[in-house]
Structure formats: C-alpha cells, structure tokens
Amino acid sequence: MSAQRPNVIPFRGGDREPAPETRAAEPVHRHHPASARTTAERTPPPPDTAPEPARTRAAAPEPEQSMYAHEAAAPVDERTGPPSRTGPRAVPAEQDPTSASPAAGRAAPFDDWAGHAFDDAERDAVYRAIRERRDVRVGFRSDPVPDDVLTRVLEAAHQAPSVGHVQPWDFLVIDSPDLRARVRDLAQAERDDHTRSLPSIRARAFSGLKVEAILDSPLNIAVTVDPTRGGRHGQGRHAQPASAAYAAALAVENLWLAARAEGLGVGWVGFVDERDVADVLELPSHLDVVAYLCVGYVEEFPTEPELSLAGWAKGRPLSWAVHRDRYGHRGLPGQEPTSLLEETITAIGGLNPRAVEEARDRQNRMTKPPGSLGVLEEVSVQLAGLAGECPPPIPEPAAVAVFAGDHGVHAQGVTAWPQEVTAQMVQNFLEGGAVVNAFAEQVGAEVTVVDVGVVGDLPRAAGLLPRKVARGTADFTQGPAMTRAQALQALEGGIEVARDLVSAGNRCLITGDMGIANTTPAATLVCALTGADPARATGRGTGVDDDMHEHKVEVVRQALAANPVDRSDPIGVLAALGGLEHAALAGFVLGGAALRVPVLLDGVIAGAAALVASAISPESMSACFAGHRSSEPGHTIALEHLGLRPLVDLEMRLGEGSGALLALPLLQGSARALRNVATFDDAGVSTVH
Ligand SMILES: O=C(O)c1ccc[n+]([C@@H]2O[C@H](COP(=O)([O-])O)[C@@H](O)[C@H]2O)c1
Ligand SMILES: Cc1cc2nc[nH]c2cc1C
C-alpha cells in the first residue's frame, strides 16, 4: 500500500466529484492561519516549565502514513501474496555449502533441505486460491456444475482435518427449488430484522447490498455437523467441545478454496438461523447446520471482498493480528515486537500540506464569497489534510463509543448521584433509552458502549464491549487512581475500539463517556496538564450545590497534593489522576489519529482525555474536532490549551457523546460543501473584479 494512500475506505456515496477545472477563478484570498503541532513538539516540556500555551495546528511534512501503511513492511503482501522464489528448486543443504542450515534459526534464508516444498508454480497456485477466494453474492450463472467438478470439490472438503479424525461433517446438496425458496424466505426475514436494527445511514447502505444468492446460484450446499460422531471417547471432545464444529468449518474452507480453483463461486449465507434451516431441511435432530452455501459459476470474482469494495468494512492488516509470546506484544516475523501504544504513536502524523493547500484553494474558488462558510471552511481544510486528499471523504458512517467507568473518589462525596447509576445508565444506553441514543438516531450514528471500569457486573449484550480493566479506580485523594499497567491497558483498549470501529467501515469516531463522579478526575487532569487552578477548572458536573462544589475543589487540590506528578510523563499523570474511561478515551483519540479518521470530541471528559493524548502525541490533535463546549469550566480551559474551537455551544453538560453527536452534521456539511459545491469556473458565475 502506498504511503500516500489516504487511510479511507473507498467512498461509494452519491456525492459528485468536483469537475476538473480549466481556469483558475480570481477569488479574494482570505488568509487562514495554519494550525497543528509538529513532531518536534512530541517531547513534553520538562516538569518545571510553565504549562504549555495553547498552540494551533500546522501542516506537517509529507509523507504521512496511516497505520494500514504498515503492511508495506510485511513480508507477505495481502494483494500479491508471498514473494515468488524465482531461482531453481532449492538444493538440499548438505549439497550446498553456501546455504545456512535450518538450525541457523529464523534469520537463515529458506532452504528446502528436505525437498518437501511445492515448486514455485504449485505454491503460487495454492496462495492464489487463498488470496482470490471470495464470498460471492452476485453474478452467478445458471450453467450447471458438472458432477465430476462437484465431486472433486466435495472430496476436497472431505479431506479437512478433524480432531480424532471423526470427520463430523455431512454435505447436503440441494437442487430442489421448493427447499431453496423456503430457505430464501428465512434469509429475507432475517435480513429485514437486521435492517431494522441498523442506524439509518447503515440501513441505507445495507439495502443496496446483496447478501445471498440462494435462488440465483444453480446449487446450494448445507454443511452439517454431528457433534456426537466418533463416540464417547472421540479425541479432543473433552478439552474442546466445539472441535466438531471447527472441523466442519475447515471442511467449508477446503470446499471454498477448491471451488475457487475450479472457477466456481461460493457464497456463505450468513442471514439465516441455523435451527430454522435444519427444520426446513428436516435434518435428524442430532445434526446442526454449520454453513449454507450458494455454489455456481460466476461472471467474475470481485478483486477484493465485496463488503470492502462497498465501503461496508475494511480489512485489518496482518500486523494487527500477530502477537509475539504474549498477547499485545505485536510484531510480524522479522520485526522487533512493539506495543500497540508505541505502534499507534509512531503511525500518527500531521496534516498533509498538499491536501490542505488544495482545500484552501478550492474553498476560495467555490461559488460563494470567500470565507463565507466561516469556521466550516477551516474544518473542511483540516478534514482534507487529515485524509490526505481534497475533497476528503464525507465523515460517514459515524460511530460513537461511550466509555464507561467508576471512580474511587466517589467516596469523597463529589457528586450527588449514587455510583450504581453508571451501570444503570449503561443498561439504558443498550436498551436505546438515553439521550445518546436519541441523538445518534437523529444523525444516523451507531452507538457502542465500552465497559472499561464499571464497578458492577454488566450482562453480555449486543453493542456492549466488555473491556473491564478494574472495578472502578482507587480514591486518588489517597494515592494513584490506577496503576500504570491499568492505565496502559485502558489506553490500548481505546485504541482497539478505534481500530474495530474503523475496520467496520466507520469514517468518523465520536467520543462518549459515562461515569458518575468522572468530572472530578477530568478537572484534576485539566489542572495537572494545563497548570490551571482547581477553583477555576472544577465545575458542578451533574449539578452540585455550593457546599458540595467547594468540597469538590478541595478534593481536586488533595488529589494533586497526594500525587505529585511529572508532566513530562503523561501516562504517569493519567494513571495517578485520571479514570479508566479518560484513559480509554485518550487511546481512542490516538487510535483514530493513527488511522487518519476524524475524532469528534464531546465534553469535559473527552477534553481531559484529549489533553492526555496531545501530551503523548501532539500530532494526534490533527484528527480532533471539538464537537461542542460543555458548561464545565475545565472544558473551556482544555479546549483553549489544545487550540480547538467548539462547533456547538449550547450550555450542555450531559456527556455520553451528546454534544459531539449534534455537531456531526456540521463536520459532514463542511466536507460535503467542499466536495459538491461548484467552482466559479464550473458554474460560469462571475467573480469580483
Ligand atoms: O461532558 C461533560 O462536559 C459533562 C459535564 C457534566 C457531567 N457529565 C456527565 O455526568 C457524569 C459525571 O458527573 P459528576 O457530577 O457525577 O461528576 C458523567 O456520566 C458525565 O458523562 C458530563
Ligand atoms: C441520569 C444521568 C445520566 C447521565 N448521562 C451521562 N451522565 C449522566 C449522569 C446521570 C446522573
């Protein structure tokens, strides 16, 4: 992947591309002050220096890279496969004194000393089948599949590995139009259910996707599993009860690869309840359906997974999935393992100056008086610089991640609300009954709730990511709120959530939070990272009376006194004075910045987290947009320190992501204007003399 390729999913929206221009208009140039920090600013100030003044963002030098660009370093390119050995077949080591012995370790060049490897053409064919296998849903031809071809494909499936060699699968080859029509009806009902559960933008995109070809393909195959096959002592049964189903899934993969080699497309129908299919097929009760497949010759195989081409989802680079010795210690073979945080920080870059310039230039040539879109012009310029292209993609679909956690400082009486409200509100979010749900629905965003530190147990639920690092933080008036390890775990948890949401096709990340008492650590972080006095930075949160507010200011002072922090160590500051949701939010910001996806910040909790993110990586602010200004005073201090201008100022102080969600249409509107509005040249409109 080229370093210049912006980290965005190919845009498939209906917005028209701006027409190429032939003659430059003569706009009245308005000077836009540059804004963003440079890499040199990554080094935080020494502890004894004054608080960092607010700085604006300046474009960073090219080339900027997204985290996806890391794949370029991988020994196996996902598009082209492994490098081909072009030389003659390897000579056994004993006969070739120049070759390193296998015992020389991983660094030794590959030498097929035993002669087991396939020759180049055979090996390339195997990798090609793997690389070009596709889940095909469109373009099936009606030509029948010849019996000998089908038998070969089924034979390949039947050679799959199985624990205890029990071969627990069976293949039901389905021609009957009646059976297939009944399965198609099941799939249709399931699809309709799913559509209703989607945010509006996603539902619209989904309605354009074909998810099955049950009647369009000449043949269906149901792959079943018999979990009892092999008898009571079937090997592996005790240690891995799911092993039979795994084996059947491996049979599906064998079938799929063999089919690809035969030129047959296969589509796995995900939108059916396996028990309903078993009923339609009148299977014996001890069999389960593992897969329902559509099989047939196809017009073409898509060059990439169809969902990826449609912008629905984006593949995860291999480097995200390979860990060395322990989970989280990432590194491809031959690379030095690194932590997720380090990898993320390294990938963060500033705005692309060329795209910034193009966007400014275009703003001045659009059919409107230069500067007339006010702040939105600079927002669009930042979006272009972040994406590395002008016009930038529209930041949709968008996803809000509500990070939830509890706080030991609650015991100090800094809020009027009981701690259990955190877990209760999480439940409310999941049931769709909170403000965040209403606003997310309004703007077509998806809501994900992340438990990073709620005291209570939360039942598993769709839309809840269980990432609990601890059951709340410790009371920071008595010592650090978190250990460094906890803070790092929460930070990396936030990065992972950003990665997951972007891989799922989102082009805008929105911060949300829930945590009774979390405005106290937010205010404390603001004080620690900006030098503000607690009396100035501490607000009334959910709404406390004068006495409680005075006490809250004192508690912030006590926390700062109990935890002498070194501002050159932002993670130390975070661990001592933050909350688990602040830490995860800081990671979320860094993760979004590394992927060059805009991060729309909510209120004071996000503001405090952004201060941490900025102290860790100043360039991460290139991805940040302040959704709104909360009425918490610490938020204004944080925004000024970061040089961020809020898009909305409505005296809100709710959290949950509510303010940022309201700002989403502004962010999207700024990008859409840059993309859709004609230039004076295009439209033949006269400009000023
Ligand atoms: O986002 C804000 O600026 C904001 C301001 C005040 C309160 N909150 C929310 O209120 C909760 C914390 O308030 P408190 O008074 O318990 O510290 C927590 O769930 C926050 O999401 C949020
Ligand atoms: C009811 C309630 C809802 C919230 N949403 C975010 N913080 C909150 C705090 C309370 C108390």
Image (cartoon, rainbow, N blue to C red):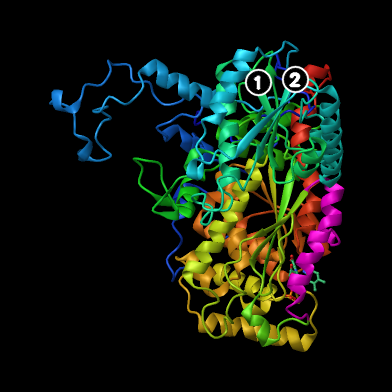
Principal secondary structure, stretch drawn in magenta: helix
Q: Residue at x 70, y 46 (%)?
A: 286
Whether residue 522 is in magenta: the answer is: no
As for residue 419 lying within the magenta part, the answer is yes
Residue 210 in which image quadrant: top right
Secondary structure of residue under mark 1:
strand
**Residue displayed at 46% across by 23% down:** 126
Residue 56: x percent and y percent? Answer: 59, 51
Q: Amino acid at mark 1?
A: Gly
Q: What kind of residue is marked 2?
A: Ser
Q: Is residue 35 above or below residue 404?
A: above
x and y percentages locating residue 204 in the rendered image: 83, 35
User: What is the spatial separation of the Cα atoms under label 1 and label 2, in whole angstroms?
Assistant: 9 Å
Local SS, label 2: loop
Answer few, some or many: residues within 10 Å of disc 1's Cα (few below 14, many 20 plus, some between 14 and 19).
many
Q: Is residue 362 above or below residue 164?
A: above
Chain part drawn in magenta: 417-445
Q: Nearer the viewer, residue 6 or 120?
A: 120
Q: Is residue 196 left or right of residue 470?
A: right
Question: Does residue 664 appear in the picture of this structure?
Answer: yes
* Quadrant of the picture in which ligand 1 is shown: bottom right
Image quarter where the C terminus lies is: top right
Check residue 571 in the rendering and tell me which mark sits there, or answer none. Answer: none
Q: Circle 1 sits on which residue?
A: 265
Which residue: 75% across, 77% down? 420
Q: How many numbered discs, if any? A: 2
Q: For disc 1, does the CB lie below 8 Å from ligand 2?
A: no
Left or right relative to 597: residue 561: left
In terms of depth relative to the viewer, which is nearer, 675 or 34?
A: 675
Foreground: 193 or 116? 116
Asked if marks 1 and 2 touch (Cβ < 8 Å), the reply is: yes
Residue beneath label 2, please? 217
